Amino acid sequence: MRENPLILIVEDEPRVSRYLRSSLQMSGYDALVAPDGVKALELVQENRPDLVLLDLRLPRMSGLEVLENIRRSNDVPVIVLTANDAEEDKVKALMLGADDYITKPFGARELQARIVAVLRRYRPAEPAAPRATVYENKDLRIDYAARQVTINRKAVHLTPTEYRLLVTMAENTNRVLTHDYLLAHVWGAEYADDVHILRATIWRLRQKVESDPTN
């Protein structure tokens, strides 16, 4: 078991990667650096980091391709690093399964806050007292104790954030939930205005649990 969380920095600009590595180490994290997308995938497999900081503009393989490859087999939390004018890339990254994004330029305190928030969501929650051991609605079944979701008795793989969002909505069946409510309960108060993340996660969740996500 690791003493400190291990964070993989995927960044091709040496000045930025040095800054990130130094900031993380000063905050008590261990850090690895990958200068391109291909090396990033190798290090994810070899080291199983606790979190990935992923720049989207990389040599050899784009950040979006790296993210897509990671999500095929790994639930490691990913925070993407985007430029101010990269709104489209930001949305694509969230749709592909990024957990958060941070816009360049950013400071050490903002970075630290985002990392803490994302790692908190991936930490197993304390067993709360659900209304029932199992939730069932037509073909959907949630086993709270096993943290398992099935559709037509087939297991559905959800990321921890997707699972928390589904459970929050299941526990409020037939109630109208506002963006603010969902963001506060699933992501935390610091995400109160981040509708991008909410909409992208709902879109991903619908692809996994609905027979016709377009309806």
Image: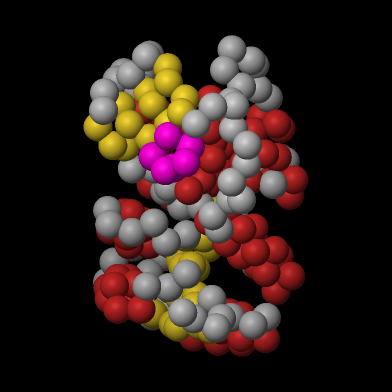
Q: Is residue 103 left or right of residue 31?
A: right
Whether residue 40 appears in magenta in the rendering, the answer is no
Q: Residue at the spot x=42%, y=17% of the render?
A: 137
Residue 39, above or below 147: below
For residue 101, say whether it is visible.
Answer: no
* Above or below 137: residue 149: below
**Observer-nearest of 127 and 114:** 127
Q: Main secondary structure of the magenta part?
A: loop
Residue 215: x %, y % from top left: 38, 14
* The one of 78 and 172 positioned closer to us in this rendering: 172
Query: Which residue is pictured at 63% across the width and 46% down the height?
Result: 187
Residue 146 seen in this snapshot: yes
Residue at left offset 59%, top offset 12%: 174
Compared across the picture, whether 125 is left or right of 8 comes to right
Q: Is residue 147 magenta?
A: yes
Residue nearer the viewer, 103 or 163? 163
Q: Position of residue 36 (x, y in %)?
A: 34, 75
What sort of colour scheme is used for the picture?
A: secondary structure
Range shown magenta: 143-148
On screen, residue 96 versus residue 84, left or right, reads left
- Where residue 179 sits: x, y (%)? 66, 29
Above/below status of 62 relative to 134? below
Above-or-below relation of 13 to 208:
below
